[in-house]
Image (spheres, helix red, strand yellow):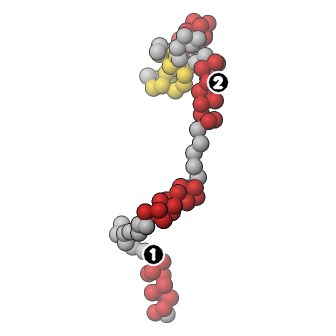
């Protein structure tokens, strides 16, 4: 893939558009990639591939985990939280002492 800076894009737009039909062209600003110019047919193909990907929701993943637990008759051990105090418990104890 070729790399172009913003100045090159303004000077050679036809060349970049021609080359993007063969392979994507990387656009950089201060040597940091910021965009890609690619052939529209490739873009459509990538967009269609992305639309076919099914991402499960958290609820679906939890249901699947529950089903696995039931199938294997397994008990999930949930460790006691140790990374920070449970603020709710301190509020409850403060209310009780009042």
How far across and how far down the image is residue 75, in percent?
41, 69
Q: Contact (CB < 8 A) between labels 1 and 2?
A: no
Residue in the foreground of this view, choosing between 11 and 20: 20
Q: Quadrant of residue 60?
A: bottom right
Q: Quadrant of residue 77?
A: bottom left
Q: Secondary structure at mark 2?
A: helix
Q: Secondary structure at mark 1?
A: helix
Q: Where 46 falls versus 67 (above or below)?
A: above
Q: Where 76 falls versus 22 (above or below)?
A: below
Left or right: 57, with 69 as reference point: right
Left or right: 9, with 76 as reference point: right
Q: Residue at x 52, y 57 (%)?
A: 64
Left or right: 42, with 98 as reference point: right
Q: Name the residue carrying label 1.
A: 87
- Counting other residues with Cα less than 10 Å from the Cα at mark 1, is it few (<14), some (14-19), or many (20 or more)? few
How far across and how far down the image is residue 17, in percent?
60, 11
How far across and how far down the image is residue 40, in percent?
64, 18
**Earlier-in-chain disc, 1 versus 2:** 2
Residue in the foreground of this view, choosing between 28 and 19: 19
Residue in the foreground of this view, choosing between 96 and 67: 67
Q: Where 36 falls versus 64 (above or below)?
A: above
- Counting other residues with Cα less than 10 Å from the Cα at mark 2, is it few (<14), some (14-19), or many (20 or more)? few
Q: Where 80 falls versus 35 (above or below)?
A: below
Query: What is the C-alpha distance between the residues marked 1 and 2?
Result: 50 Å
Q: Residue furthest bottom?
A: 98
Q: Residue at x 54, y 25 (%)?
A: 35
How far across and how far down the image is residue 24, in percent?
53, 17
**Residue 44 circle label:** 2
Q: Residue at x 62, y 36 (%)?
A: 52
């Amino acid at each position: 893939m070729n790399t172009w800076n913003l100045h090159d894009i303004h000077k050679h737009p036809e060349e970049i558009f021609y080359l993007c039909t063969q392979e994507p062209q990387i656009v950089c600003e201060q040597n940091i990639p910021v965009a890609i110019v690619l052939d529209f047919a490739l873009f459509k193909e990538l967009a269609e591939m992305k639309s076919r990907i099914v991402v499960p929701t958290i609820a679906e993943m939890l249901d699947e985990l529950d089903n696995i637990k039931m199938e294997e008759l397994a008990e999930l051990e949930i460790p006691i939280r140790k990374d920070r105090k449970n603020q709710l418990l301190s509020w409850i104890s403060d209310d009780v002492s009042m």
